[in-house]
Amino acid sequence: NASVYLGSAVGALLVGQPRMSAAGSRAQIMLSDLLFVLGALLCASAQDIRALLLGRLASGVGLGISAIAAPLFIAEVSPRERRGANATKHGVFIAVGILASICFGLPQSPPPNSPGEHLSELDCWFWRLLLGIPLVPALFQALLFKYVIPIDPPSFLVQQGCVTEARSLLYRTYGRDPPAEGDLAAGRSSRVIRLELQINELVEASASAKATPRIRIFQAVCDPFLRCALLLGFGLAAFQQLCGINALMSYSNSLFREAGILPSQLTLASTAMAATNVVASMWSSKVVDHWGRRRLLLTGSFLQAVAMAAITFAADALPRSLTGLLTVASFTVFVVSFSAGLGAVTWLYLSEIYPMEIRGAALSACGVINWLSCFVVVFGARFLSLHSSCKLFGIISFVGFVGVYLWVIETKGCSMDDSPLTPRSARSSSSLLTPTEVKERAELTAS
């Protein structure tokens, strides 16, 4: 697993490169699909540990790219009013994938306890099938994006100079046909006016981005206008992993066993937890545009801290006969709270707070921080007990809750190029985002 997370950090780093950013989110998703296919083939045919690690590394690079590109693509092609609901469905299908992976693995026996223990007939080959399964959905998605629905977001089309195509796609997104030229009645419609304003915003943002030289992350951090959004994004990306979700999921059976769950019931406990996770993700996608991003993040992180506190209390104060049941219940609450909050909202929120000029580089930096944090937590959790892990992750969840309360600003319904953290009305205060000709014009006017 560690090789996957390191590969994911590399993939996130690649997303921020100029050529990758210029390719658009659809092309990035297709590239990640090809890496998933390569990783699945290498793992399924591996003859030694090096080939297996190489396959997992390739899959990790694909994961790092798709974890950024997929929610960004969904957000860019969605109506502004339904952006949250559509983008959080990405989290729903991740939860479905986790549940499916657990179900696929049910026929396989637990790992051997010692090097001398031989594998059964099924276990000798079934692991190759499990590692090769991702090839099928990845190849299907790549072919779908290439030949069936080769649709790029309106913002990308505007950047390529295809304003007419972008306008047509934006209207189709809202279930309408663009009004014919000279159709005065349609032109006076409030919905048409709003859509035309959105196109004008995209054209203006694209022109501004083209007039702005490439901005590197360290430059943006030094810019007062961009600093707050960047530091908030870095903190939120780190918090999503430092709260311990991947560590706890990776070692859930070991933690359940330590809490007193019988070996015969470990798989049942994990499956029930994953099924509940799917339900929570679906609920989150239904309410995100009503509750808002901030409220879901606050609720989720607070319940995570409560769940970890409950497990710590059970390990200290309750008899072993009750510890197992409370541990499974609290662990399920933790996973459900994460899925409804940090899991569903983090990348949606990050895709909404950065202007077009730095969006690719900023999301790339957030991705690198996110996956390196994941690597540190998953690797470090191997050396912690159930009590120590829950105490640590509970403290981190509570600190994150306080941070969300203090610094996260609501973004539901806002334009992706005019967020409350980086409003267009205040762009003139940024020396990096103000085009050269605008500066010169302002200087001439002042003189």
Image (tube, rainbow, N blue to C red):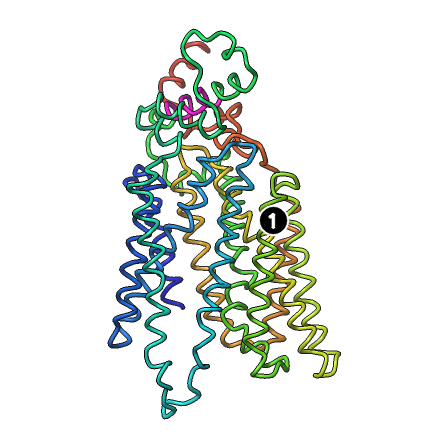
Quadrant hosting residue 319: bottom right
In the picture, measured across the screen, residue 71 lies left or right of residue 401, that is left
Number of numbered markers: 1
Name the residue beneath numbered marker 1. 284
Residue type, mark 1 in image: Ser
On the image, the x and y values in percent for residue 46 come to: 26, 73
On the image, the x and y values in percent for residue 42 come to: 26, 66
In the picture, measured across the screen, residue 319 lies left or right of residue 40, that is right
Predominant secondary structure, magenta span: helix
On the image, the x and y values in percent for residue 347 come to: 49, 46
- At a point 40% along the width and 68% down the height, the residue shown is 1
Quadrant location, the C terminus: top left
Figure check: 45 above or below 280: below
Query: Which sits in the foreground, 407 or 317?
Result: 317
On the image, the x and y values in percent for residue 229 come to: 52, 40
- At a point 66% along the width and 41% down the height, the residue shown is 291
Verify whether residue 154 appears in magenta. Answer: no
Figure check: 378 above or below 426: below
Q: Residues within 10 Å of mark 1 (few under 14, many from 20)?
A: many
Query: Which sits in the foreground, 344 or 394?
Result: 344
Query: Given the current orientation, which residue lies at the most extreme bottom position?
Result: 116
Verify whether residue 207 appears in magenta. Answer: yes
- At a point 35% along the width and 35% down the height, the residue shown is 151
Quadrant hosting residue 307: bottom right
Query: Which sits in the foreground, 384 or 84?
Result: 84
The magenta span reads 198-208
Determine whether the residue tagged by mark 1 lies in a helix, strand or loop: helix
